[in-house]
Every structure is written in structure tokens, then in C-alpha cells.
Image (cartoon, rainbow, N blue to C red):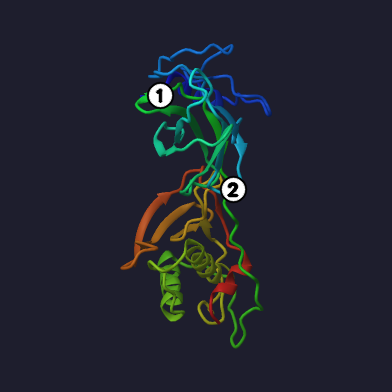
């Protein structure tokens, strides 16, 4: 069940309520105020202060997708006893993504997250002390945002030689599909389980670039600049298996199971993409990924 503080915090962020350098005002229902030590209504059964969040905090953007959480320890009646700590990370639908039980170090603690989060996405974390079967109050929620996705840029190479490229023309989806399939098969690309996402993105960008700019080997009849690639908007990474008609935003998924063994090409019409998804032509430099 969502805590009242998380609902309030989410609403505050949705409506743009934030202030750089100032702690977020909503707190966990159990957070103590004024230094009073008391068991909180969220299940706290030992009289200690909640841990103090150091970083990340106050909607700061972290480097990468694995934050390092830093906090100051709880204090209370059992100051000479070493607590353990329970740490939680949730997304903005209040889904628990990550939980760890950690030992105590002197004065403060830290923990580097062990899994990748999505790029350019807000998350929240909190922490509380524990002693045997007892628990202290939760800290306030610490809000942070992950780093932007890296931009995949292929190194430019000279224009393919050994042939000519015809004038600009209009290519049907079927011709685009066959061109990309020929590049995949003739270039001996492997988009299966041993490939990385960057490799697959480079392939689709390069193949669509051969359509959009023409290619002396793979598309000598002439370019059609009305074919694009896409991402999902909001800083999310580019698609590795979708082509888009630029002016109408009609999209087709070309590869089923991309990134897995047994993947295959197909013609799956996705309809017209919503405006939240970015559509753009691949750079000419993406041709560097396609063999001459």
C-alpha cells in the first residue's frame, strides 16, 4: 500500500513542486520531528531517530544508472548497540525495485546499488534501522533521477565507392524491409544473444541510413529520405528494431526477439506513433557501420 508521504511526494513532483538545495517537505509518517524519540505509526518498535539521508537527495541527477546511497545512522536509547539497516528503492508507481539489509558502520553508511535502473527516470529510496526483530522509523524519501542515455554515434567513413547511387525516389515499406534484410544477411550481422544493445542500435541506424542516403552496394537505385528511426521519448534509448516513415509517423517492427537467440525478421505494423516518441533521420555517419 502506498504511504501518504509517497502519494504526496509524487503529486508534488508531477505538478513541478521542487526547490534546489532544500530538503523535500513530505516525510515518512514515522519520521520524528524536533528530536523527539518515539515509535512511529509505520511499524517502528524501537525508539530511535530515522536515518538522515545524505545523497542522493532533493531530486538530484546521478551519474550513471547505479546510485551510491549515503546516510547518517540512527541514534537513540541503544546508542552503544550496532543496528542493521533496511534499504528500499521504488519507482514512481510505488513498485519496490530493490531491497537490501546492510550492516552498520561508524557514524554513517553507504551502499552502491547492484543493478541498473532505467536511464533518465526518477526513483526514490528510504532506509530504517533494525535491531534483532525490532525496527526503527523509516527515513524521509530521497528522490533522484538517473543519467541521460548515451548518444550512439558512429564514426564517419568515406562515401562507399565502386558504384553509383541513383536519384532520390520513394521507396515502399516492402522495399525498405528487403533492403534492411539484405544488409543483415549479406553483412553477416548477428543480433542475437551475444550482441549488445549498442550494436543492435548501430545496425538499425546504419541500415535505415542506407535507405535514407542511398548506398552503392545495398541501395544503389537511390535514397528515400522519408525513412527514420525512433526512441521512446523522455531521454529513453533509441529503438533497435523499428523503422518509421518520417512524415506520417507510421512505424513497423522488423525484428522479433532482438537480442535473443532465435530472433527473426517480420513485418509488424505498429500504427502511428504518439507524439511522446521522438522520430528522426539517422545521421549520415551511421553508414560507417554498414559494410561496403
- Asked if residue 145 is positioned above or below residue 39 in the image, the reply reads below
Residue drawn at x 46%, y 21% as measured from the top left? 137
SS at mark 2?
Answer: loop
- Asked if residue 96 is positioned above or below residue 184 in the image, the reply reads above
User: What whole-number distance in Å separates the C-alpha atoms at marks 1 and 2?
Assistant: 36 Å
On the picture, is 161 further left or further right than 14? right
1 or 2: tag closer to the N-terminus: 1
**Is the Cβ of the residue at disc 1 closer than 8 Å to that at disc 2?**
no
Q: Quadrant of the N terminus?
A: top left
- Say which residue label 1 marks: 135
Viewer-proximal residue among 282 and 237: 237
Residue 57, position as x, y percentages in the image: 60, 32
- Which labelled disc corresponds to residue 148? 2
Q: Quadrant of the C terminus?
A: bottom right
Q: Residue furthest left?
A: 262
Q: Residues within 10 Å of mark 2 (few under 14, many from 20)?
A: some
The quarter holding residue 136 reads top left
Q: Residue furthest bottom?
A: 162
Residue 290, position as x, y percentages in the image: 54, 75
Q: Residue furthest front?
A: 80
- Asked if residue 158 is positioned above or below residue 10 in the image, the reply reads below
The quarter holding residue 210 reads bottom right
Residue drawn at x 50%, y 33% as measured from the top left? 124
Label tally: 2
Amino acid at each position: 500500500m502506498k504511504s501518504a508521504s509517497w502519494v504526496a511526494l509524487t503529486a508534488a513532483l508531477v505538478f513541478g513542486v521542487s526547490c534546489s538545495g532544500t530538503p523535500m517537505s513530505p516525510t515518512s509518517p514515522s519520521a520524528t520531528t524536533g528530536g523527539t524519540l518515539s515509535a512511529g505509526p509505520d511499524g517502528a518498535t524501537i525508539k530511535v531517530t530515522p536515518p538522515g539521508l545524505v545523497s542522493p537527495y532533493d531530486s538530484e541527477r546521478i551519474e550513471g544508472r547505479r546510485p551510491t546511497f549515503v546516510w547518517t545512522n540512527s541514534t537513540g536509547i541503544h546508542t552503544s548497540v550496532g543496528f542493521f539497516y533496511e534499504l528500499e528503492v521504488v519507482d514512481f508507481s510505488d513498485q519496490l525495485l530493490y531491497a537490501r539489509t546492510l550492516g552498520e558502520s561508524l557514524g554513517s553508511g553507504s551502499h552502491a546499488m547492484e543493478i541498473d535502473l532505467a536511464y533518465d527516470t526518477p526513483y526514490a529510496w528510504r532506509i530504517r534501522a533494525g535491531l534483532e526483530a525490532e525496527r526503527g522509523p523509516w527515513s524521509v524519501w530521497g528522490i533522484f533521477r538517473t543519467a541521460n542515455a548515451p548518444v550512439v554515434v558512429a564514426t564517419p567513413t568515406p562515401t562507399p565507392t565502386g558504384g553509383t547511387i541513383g536519384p532520390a525516389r520513394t521507396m515502399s515499406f516492402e522495399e525498405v524491409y528487403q533492403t534492411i534484410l539484405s544488409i543483415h544477411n549479406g553483412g553477416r550481422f548477428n543480433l542475437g544473444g551475444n550482441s549488445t544493445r549498442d550494436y543492435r542500435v548501430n545496425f538499425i541506424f546504419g541500415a535505415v541510413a542506407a535507405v535514407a542516403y542511398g548506398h552503392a552496394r545495398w541501395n544503389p537505385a537511390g535514397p528515400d529520405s522519408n525513412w527514420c528511426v525512433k526512441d521512446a521519448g523522455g531521454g529513453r534509448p533509441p529503438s533497435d528494431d523499428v523503422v518509421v516513415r518520417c512524415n506520417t509517423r507510421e512505424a513497423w517492427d522488423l525484428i522479433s526477439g532482438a537480442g535473443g537467440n532465435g530472433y527473426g525478421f517480420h513485418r509488424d505494423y505498429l500504427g502511428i506513433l504518439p507524439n511522446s516518441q521522438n522520430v528522426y533521420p539517422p545521421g549520415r555517419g551511421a553508414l560507417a557501420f554498414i559494410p561496403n
